[in-house]
Image (cartoon, rainbow, N blue to C red):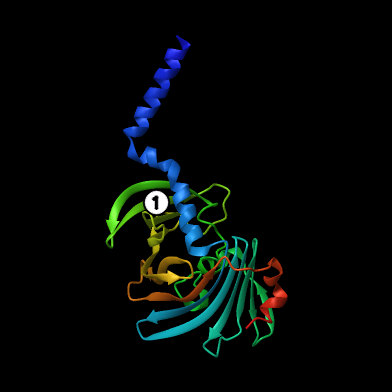
Amino acid sequence: MKLFKLSRTVLILGLSILLNPVLAQSEDATEIVRKSDQLMQGDSYISIMTMKIVRPSWDRTITFKSWGKGRDLALTYIQTPAADKGQTFLKRTNEMWTWNPKINRLIKLPPSMLAQGWMGSDYSNDDILKESSIVVDYHHKILKEVKYEGFDCWVIQMNPKEDAAVVWGKVISYIVKGKYFPLKVEYFNEDGDLVKTHLNSDVKQMDDREIPTKTIVQPADEPNKKTVVTIEKMDFNVNLQDKFFSQQNMKRIR
């Protein structure tokens, strides 16, 4: 009798999962996000990127080189324009710093600055230094499956864990099935209002993988402004020592 009751319970549970596609998929959402994050960053990386800040009456272009290792170490160096060359940004675990050679000053960035625009752009400090982790700091759920820009995509909602120190109240990502790169990412504040959207395109071979190489960052409340970030070169799973990510090295790298 006990065996019959147990079998019936298992059968009912199995049928409920099969009849509820979202429930059936939800257990895979975190793995999808993990694969996407691993694709875009690897265990470590070195990249050269160009960022164009577009405003109604002007635009500005910045070139920068970045190094990253895991979720705790990141370093970014401004190459151009000449006025900003040499400025560096460092993340070590939960601490973030910026070095400005013109004033010979090292400044610690408070967590409150994570959501602010990096170098006057729509790209945030959190985007550059990757203080929060979409894998570790969020719960994940597949909302639906759609065709977007010609690709079959999972639409995955990410809600922050209670103890996570994150910028966003919710993130929704369109991740391409089988390829795992994100094509569209929407960022919401704690009130549920859309703050900005990242639109990814120009899929190209970078090192050993295919990834989008162009990101348009579009503020929700300022349609006449945008920031365009282009990956010029990116190498993955490179040999980087932890000691490379130091305050001393902020002043030495080129």
Give the image location of residue 85, x and y in percent: 57, 86
Q: Mark 1 points at which residue?
A: 156
Is residue 254 in view from this perspective?
yes
Dividing the picture into quadrants, the one containing residue 8 is: top left
Q: Quarter of the image containing the C terminus?
A: bottom right
Q: Nearer the viewer, residue 110 or 85?
A: 85
Give the image location of residue 208, x and y in percent: 48, 67
**Going by the image, does 159 lie left or right of 114?**
left
Q: Is 5 located above or below residue 45 in the figure?
A: above
Residue at x 46% of width, y 57% of height = 36
Q: Which of 169 and 239 is in front in this view?
A: 239
Give the image location of residue 204, x and y in percent: 39, 71
Residue that extends furthest to the bottom in the rendered view of this protein: 82
Residue at x 71% of width, y 69% of height = 243
How many numbered circles does the render carry?
1
Q: Is 98 located above or below residue 84 in the figure?
A: above
Give the image location of residue 196, x and y in percent: 40, 65
Amino acid of disc 1: Ile
Q: Look at the numbered disc 1 and give the secondary structure of its residue.
A: strand
Mark 1: few, some, or many residues within 10 Å (few <14, many ≥20)? many
Q: Quarter of the image containing the N terminus?
A: top left
**Going by the image, does 86 lie left or right of 213?**
right
Dividing the picture into quadrants, the one containing residue 165 is: bottom right
Residue at x 49% of width, y 70% of height = 207
Is residue 140 in view from this perspective?
no
Residue that extends furthest to the top in the rendered view of this protein: 1
Q: Is 173 located above or below residue 97 in the figure?
A: above
